[in-house]
Image (cartoon, helix red, strand yellow):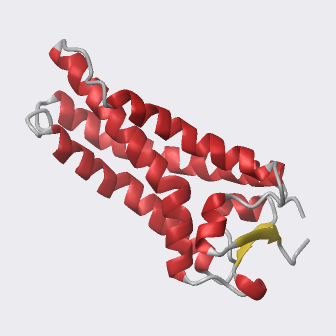
């Protein structure tokens, strides 16, 4: 079984679109706070932590909750008629779903976020970003590229599915 790579990618795009809508709502609050100077005085690490707790953590928790639910799928997977299962086709635990979505979304997002914040901070001060930012950027793009390629090689099971002991299958309602 190849794991439905094109359907999985389409499901991922649907989920990313919904997360971006949520990010847009947060930006509607955050941009005015930044422009009025409320957030400008915060150190870079504080800005990163705030944004992680407002955007990344809720996204990961929501996706995990949906995959651990009775329907065993995010909204994107429901649209594409896919579900996430555990060993023996069992419903996955919330812990497995957290592991899966932390590795799939959270880790690359947080790495990329840290790099972008550092670049933004350096450019706003008129300085050149530190050398350490470039490996972060490579990782933030490299990890999702590896995830995507893994859908099309071997049995199509991603490293985050292997780590969480999960499988993505066609839903029963098909």
Spot the residue most to the left.
41
Q: Residue at x 76, y 54 (%)?
A: 8
Q: Quadrant of residue 129?
A: top left
Horizontal side of residue 71 vs 101, given as left or right = right
Spot the residue most to the top.
126
Instruction: Residue 12: tell me if it is visible.
Output: yes
Q: Above or below — where is 83 with respect to 137?
A: below
Q: Above or below — where is 126 with respect to 137?
A: above
Disc tally is: 0
Quadrant assignment for the N terminus: bottom right
Horizontal side of residue 157 vs 39, given as left or right = right
Between 7 and 134, the one lying in front of the other is 134
Between 62 and 24, the one lying in front of the other is 62
Horizontal side of residue 112 vs 40, given as left or right = right
Q: Residue at x 48, y 39 (%)?
A: 139
Horizontal side of residue 143 vs 115, given as left or right = right
Q: Residue at x 59, y 44 (%)?
A: 144
Residue 83: % across, % down: 75, 71
Q: Residue at x 39, y 48 (%)?
A: 110
Q: Quadrant of residue 134?
A: top left
Instruction: Residue 13: tell me if it is visible.
Output: no
Between 28 and 166, the one lying in front of the other is 166
Residue 70: % across, % down: 66, 84
Residue 76: % across, % down: 69, 57
Residue 166: % across, % down: 68, 73
Quadrant assignment for the C terminus: bottom right
């Amino acid at each position: 079984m190849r794991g439905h790579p094109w359907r999985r990618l389409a499901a991922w795009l649907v989920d990313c679109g919904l997360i971006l809508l949520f990010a847009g709502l947060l930006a509607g609050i955050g941009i005015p706070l930044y422009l009025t100077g409320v957030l400008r005085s915060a150190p870079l690490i504080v800005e990163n932590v705030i944004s992680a707790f407002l955007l990344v953590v809720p996204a990961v928790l929501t996706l995990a909750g949906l995959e651990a639910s009775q329907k065993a799928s995010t909204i994107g997977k429901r649209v594409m008629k896919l579900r996430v299962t555990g060993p023996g086709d069992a419903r996955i635990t919330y812990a497995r779903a957290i592991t899966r979505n932390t590795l799939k979304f959270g880790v690359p997002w947080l790495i990329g976020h840290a790099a972008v914040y550092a670049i933004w901070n350096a450019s706003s001060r008129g300085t050149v970003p530190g050398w350490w930012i470039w490996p972060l950027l490579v990782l933030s793009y490299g990890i999702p590229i590896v995830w995507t390629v893994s859908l099309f090689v071997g049995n199509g099971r991603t490293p985050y599915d292997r780590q969480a002991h999960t499988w993505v299958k066609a839903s029963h309602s098909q």
